[in-house]
Image: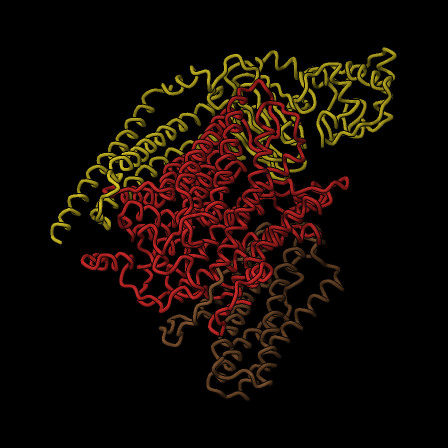
């Protein structure tokens, strides 16, 4: 099967109606959502519905009045706005604006991650909680941990974009690719809304 | 050297490349056709291995109180057989055909993400090899190596550390987890390809049913596989980090695993059958010389099945003591899913009705599929009847049922597809004589193996037992099943010989050996690496019919 | 072209006629069957299967077939089963009949034939017919199923007044039965009174098992940390067999169940005897055997009332009242006991009982001690 046909004339072909990148990232988001749904279901089942008592800390005492997590949530959600601004700036070709908005996005996302680290240091270091200490630990660390992992992935990708932009290799023709990445970042934020509601609201205030 | 899409400047090579270079070409390829062939070939190799495992099972059960195989080995065999056939044979072969055919059928050059496609294949392959490495690499309780022995649905708490002290379960989890990533990548790729890359004029409602079935399968993979991944991650957390998800001694719930697994598991069954529906919907019209009957209803039925397949999972759990109302709900939803399936079967019969049927090997397999799938579907309806399920769930009746669906269904369709599209893939025809022999021997062997299983199940034989007492009336049925295995084994040998022989000495196929109507037959056999030049433009569901019958084109009737 | 269209219309009407006739016939068949089942309590079909010795072997020692019903619950289930089986057979005959008919009638008779047959793109009335009629059949099945589920499956609060409670606990790979009312603890073999509702409370000590005695009741899983309720009433005195039906590990195949249904008086005798402590035999061998039993690991797992209270393994207080040992693998004879104590792994590989490397005389003594446990 060693055939080498001449390269067809691709330029003459019909442009596609739907963007591969956007449809692809939407599919990835659907897939990832179902992954998160499982961990949310596990949390709801054990902690919110069954309210398993196995000697572990009580989530109501643990999470009620935790101001830090509200501040962190607001920062993460506002980073969704800044990433849109960055994306629009890039599409217009305003590269400096793009870089500033992207840097702000990174800072906001970084702050969220920092807040998570602080919380985990408190839970693990001070209270001795971990996946194996109680059902709450199991559900909490796996759910919040997987979200944090997605934040890390998103931040890494966004930082790469910033780096590439500083190298001058992110022209406005690539704006759609950046927009695709920003959709992923929105997804990370929207998942947090669900995680936040599940972990910090449902059991704690009902 | 490989041909990169869009940017390649490859020139015709002066001489035929050496063996090493050709292997290298296949390893680094990102051409959807080569990846499709790789998927199918890897699937067939795993199929042979899984078939040998089935042979060990049938040998041990051939007569009562057979002392040959020890229980641990037996348990490993049925676990590996099930896991292999579902994850390493069914999915890759079906997705491989999807990979090969989808771009050709919608008139485009490649999949939407060719590199992701290659990644998906290699991840799947190494996931499978990781699973099989457990035979030598896993350390069991007394240092004995061994494959997983927890059954293909690996019910908790059998998989907790307390009851499984080696790490064979970890091989099961990681192997399937890794190959699952490959499947998800391919699922997403199929959906994006179909939504974004259709050629001019190829509206959604003009796509061949095969492409529709791949679209639906892609969506199901996207939705079902992450649930299995999540469950397996939880299991890994339980086993390595001491998490409490599934361990009942630590307030975990063993039923959570079952719910998650079957939420994946039932759509998975449809992932394995919907592409088969697609193959059949292509083969039957061509060999009946008639257009598919009720195209719109066929599409509606596919989408209906896909949606509903996500609401029937607990019919695998009728005996776990769910509340009666839940049992009733899942019985009702399971009955209802029979309706779109029935529509499809009636529409296939409607397609051959009034046709001029040509009995070539692909058609034999396609009609065999319809006949056998009806049986599997009907025993499925019986099993949805909760009280009857209390009688026969987890018995050989269930084993018989799902083999009628997945062997008489999916595998017959796969063989049909291989006979139908092999000429396109290789440029050579498979031998008709051997093909017909293959079909009839397999058909007889298949029924001889799996029909008696319904009886042994109703006589009280649970599945997954490695031995049974001689005075239970089970002997004769099991002996028949084991003889049937031998017959099937011969059929598979004929098949393998047919492939090897035809690759060397088969007749040349030409571009369109079956006088068919979909776009893949409009290009050369095998297709050039750019598929079409220029890209086709279609006006109806059967572009080649339009070309062959300009006086009565299809688009006047759609 | 007009001619072609006319051909299409004719073909479609002819298909519609066949489909509607056949499907309406099927619905009629179902309706007649349901009416018939309402009128006669006892299915004629059931008699047919019971009379056939393929499905029911009159002389088999081991009848576990679902074709024999020995309790009201199984009769209820099987009435529904026959309805479903017959509907399925009806659909099978119709669909495969249509398929085979079309395959023969519409084969290409002459390889030289050129030109294509009339193209039929679909037909709304035909397709509507084969959507709506299956829905009707499905609704029928659904109603029948829901009714039977509710009449057979008990829930926690529905324990009948006069019932006998039996706690069933699955172990790898044997069954523990407890009857709190009579203070009975036994293994693998259960004796219950005839014609009295038996209320089962199923649980597990380790992994998931499933309790299945086909002639008395369908299966229900025994799950750790969850209690399932199940119920049956045996019609007749006799022995009923079954086994674990959910894969539970290495020896899943050898986890058998034996239920002896006796009349009320015999049951009471048995239960009273089971509740007694172990007799205190004084033959020298049995005394030695008891010493071995207490000195080696035996007593850690096996309970003998008044002597040891291990409960990881079957209670041995009345071992000799059982007919089988090793989870139902072997007849309970002195020789088998000796072989078992000497090396259980040779008989039931993977089971939790180790070979304790006892000397010949120790084995003799232990078994003669066990033989006193009547």
Residue situated in front as seen by the camera: C238 or B335? B335
Residue C276, percent across and down?
A: 73, 17
Q: Is residue B551 above or below residue C34?
A: below
Number of callouts in the render? 0
Q: In which quarter of the image is residue C324?
A: top right
Give the left or right position of residue C76, taking residue C160 as reference.
left
Residue B136 seen by the camera: yes
Instruction: Give percent across and percent down for residue B245.
Output: 64, 50
Out of A132 and C154, give the one closest to the viewer: A132
Q: Residue at x 60, y 75 (%)?
A: A109
Q: Colour of chain B?
A: red
| x, y percent for residue B386 | 45, 35
Query: Quick one: which chain is brown?
Result: A
Residue B518: percent from the left, percent from the top? 33, 56
Quarter containing the C terminus of chain B:
bottom left
Q: Which of the 4 image quadrants contains residue A13?
A: bottom left
Q: Can residue C124 be seen in this view?
A: no
Residue that appears at 41% across and 60% down: B527
Q: Residue furthest left?
A: C2
Q: In which quarter of the image is the N terminus of chain B?
A: bottom right
Residue at the spot 54% in from the left edge and 13% down from the top edge: C237
Closest to the observer: B369 or C157?
B369
Q: Chain C is drawn in which colour?
A: yellow
Where B190 sits versus B439, above or below? below
């Amino acid at each position: 099967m060693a055939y080498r046909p001449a390269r067809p004339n691709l330029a003459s072909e019909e442009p596609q109606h739907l963007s591969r990148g956007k449809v692809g990232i939407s599919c990835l988001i659907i897939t990832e959502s179902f992954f998160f749904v499982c961990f949310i279901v596990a949390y709801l089942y054990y902690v919110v519905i069954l309210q398993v008592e196995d000697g572990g800390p009580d989530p109501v005492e643990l999470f009620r009045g935790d101001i830090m997590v509200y501040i962190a949530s607001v920062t993460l959600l506002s980073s969704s706005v800044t990433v849109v601004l960055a994306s629009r700036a890039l599409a217009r070709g305003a590269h400096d604006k793009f870089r500033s908005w992207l840097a702000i996005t990174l800072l906001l996302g970084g702050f969220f991650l920092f807040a998570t680290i602080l919380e985990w240091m408190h839970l693990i270091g001070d209270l001795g909680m971990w996946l194996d200490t109680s059902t709450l630990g199991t559900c909490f660390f796996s759910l919040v941990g997987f979200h944090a992992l997605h934040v890390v992935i998103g931040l890494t990708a966004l930082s790469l974009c910033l780096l590439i932009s500083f190298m001058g290799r992110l022209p406005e023709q690539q704006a759609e690719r950046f927009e695709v990445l920003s959709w992923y970042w929105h997804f990370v934020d929207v998942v947090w809304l669900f995680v936040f509601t599940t972990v910090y609201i449902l059991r704690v205030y009902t | 050297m490989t041909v990169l899409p869009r940017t390649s400047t490859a020139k015709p090579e002066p001489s035929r490349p050496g063996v090493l270079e050709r292997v290298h070409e296949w390893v680094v390829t990102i051409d959807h056709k080569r990846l499709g062939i790789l998927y199918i070939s890897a699937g067939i190799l795993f199929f042979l291995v899984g078939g040998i495992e089935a042979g060990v099972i049938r040998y041990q059960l051939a007569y009562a109180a057979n002392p040959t195989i020890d229980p641990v080995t037996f348990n490993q065999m049925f676990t590996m057989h099930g896991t292999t056939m579902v994850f390493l044979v069914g999915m890759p072969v079906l997705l491989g055909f999807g990979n090969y055919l989808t771009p050709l059928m919608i008139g485009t050059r490649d999949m939407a993400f060719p590199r992701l496609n290659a990644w998906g294949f290699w991840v799947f392959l190494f996931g499978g090899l990781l699973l099989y490495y457990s035979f030598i690499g896993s350390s069991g309780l007394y240092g004995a190596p061994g494959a997983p022995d927890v059954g293909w649905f690996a019910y908790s708490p059998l998989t907790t550390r307390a009851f499984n002290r080696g790490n064979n379960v970890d091989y099961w989890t990681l192997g399937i987890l890794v190959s699952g990533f490959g499947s998800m990548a391919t699922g997403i790729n199929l959906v994006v390809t179909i939504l974004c890359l259709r050629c001019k004029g190829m509206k959604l409602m003009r796509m061949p049913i095969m492409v529709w079935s791949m679209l639906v399968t892609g969506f199901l993979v996207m939705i079902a596989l992450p649930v299995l991944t999540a469950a397996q991650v939880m299991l890994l957390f339980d086993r390595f980090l001491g998490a409490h998800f599934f361990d009942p001694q630590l307030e975990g719930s063993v039923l959570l695993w079952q719910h998650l697994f079957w939420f994946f598991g039932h759509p998975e069954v449809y992932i394995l059958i919907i592409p088969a529906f697609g193959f059949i919907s292509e083969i039957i019209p061509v060999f009946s010389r008639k257009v598919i009957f009720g195209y719109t209803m066929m599409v509606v039925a596919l989408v209906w099945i896909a949606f509903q397949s996500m609401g029937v999972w607990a019919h695998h759990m009728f005996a776990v003591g769910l509340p009666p109302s839940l049992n009733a709900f899942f019985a009702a939803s399971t009955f209802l899913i029979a309706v779109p399936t029935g529509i499809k079967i009636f529409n296939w019969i409607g397609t051959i009705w009034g046709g001029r049927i040509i009995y070539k090997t692909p058609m034999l397999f396609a009609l065999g599929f319809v006949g056998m799938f009806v049986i599997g579907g009907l025993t499925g309806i019986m099993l949805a009847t909760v009280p009857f399920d209390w009688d026969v769930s987890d018995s050989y009746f269930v084993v018989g049922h799902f083999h009628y669906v997945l062997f008489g269904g999916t595998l017959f369709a796969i063989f049909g597809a291989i006979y139908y599209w092999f000429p396109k893939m290789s440029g050579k025809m498979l031998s008709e004589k051997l093909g017909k022999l293959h079909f009839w021997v397999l058909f007889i062997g298949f029924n001889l193996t799996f029909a008696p299983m319904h009886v042994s199940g109703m006589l009280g034989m649970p599945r997954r037992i490695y031995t049974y007492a001689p005075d239970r009336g089970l002997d004769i049925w099991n002996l028949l099943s084991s003889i049937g295995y031998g017959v099937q084994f011969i059929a598979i040998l004929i098949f393998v010989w047919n492939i090897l022989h035809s690759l060397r000495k088969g007749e040349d196929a030409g571009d369109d050996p079956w006088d068919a109507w979909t776009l893949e037959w409009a290009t050369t056999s095998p297709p050039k690496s750019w598929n079409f030049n220029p890209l086709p433009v279609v006006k109806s569901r059967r572009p080649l019919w339009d070309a062959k019958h300009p006086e009565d084109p299809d688009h006047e009737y759609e | 072209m007009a001619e072609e269209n006319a051909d299409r219309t004719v073909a479609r009407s002819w298909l519609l006629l066949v489909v509607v006739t056949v499907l309406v016939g099927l619905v009629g068949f179902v309706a007649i069957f349901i009416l018939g089942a309402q009128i006669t309590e006892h299915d004629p079909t059931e008699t047919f299967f019971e009379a056939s010795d393929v499905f029911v072997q009159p002389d088999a020692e081991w009848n576990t077939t679902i074709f024999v019903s020995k309790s009201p619950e199984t009769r209820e289930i099987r009435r529904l089963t026959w309805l479903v089986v017959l509907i399925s057979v009806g659909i099978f005959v119709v669909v495969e009949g249509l398929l085979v008919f079309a395959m023969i009638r519409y084969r290409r008779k002459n390889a030289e034939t050129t030109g294509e047959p009339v193209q039929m793109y679909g037909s709304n009335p035909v397709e509507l017919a084969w959507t709506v009629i299956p829905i009707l059949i499905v609704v029928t099945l659904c109603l029948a199923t829901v009714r039977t589920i509710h009449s057979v499956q008990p829930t926690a609060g529905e324990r009948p007044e006069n019932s006998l409670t039996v706690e069933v606990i699955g172990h790898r790979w044997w069954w523990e039965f407890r009857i709190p009312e009579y203070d009975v603890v036994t293994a693998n073999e259960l004796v219950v009174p005839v014609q009295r509702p038996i209320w089962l409370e199923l649980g597990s000590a380790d992994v998931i098992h499933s309790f299945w005695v086909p002639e008395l009741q369908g299966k229900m899983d025994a799950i750790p940390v969850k209690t399932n309720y199940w119920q049956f009433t045996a019609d007749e005195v006799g022995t009923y067999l079954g086994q674990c039906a959910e894969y539970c590990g290495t020896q899943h195949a050898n986890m058998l169940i034996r239920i002896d249904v006796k009349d009320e008086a015999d049951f009471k005798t048995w239960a009273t005897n089971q509740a007694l402590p172990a007799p205190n035999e004084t033959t020298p061998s049995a005394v030695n055997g008891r010493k071995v039993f207490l000195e080696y690991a035996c007593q850690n797992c096996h309970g003998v009332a008044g002597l040891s209270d291990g409960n990881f393994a079957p209670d041995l207080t009345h071992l000799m009242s059982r007919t089988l040992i090793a989870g139902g693998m072997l007849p309970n004879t002195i020789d088998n006991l000796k072989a078992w104590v000497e090396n259980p792994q040779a008989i039931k590989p993977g089971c939790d009982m180790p070979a304790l490397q006892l000397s010949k005389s120790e084995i003799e003594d232990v078994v003669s001690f066990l033989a006193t446990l009547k």
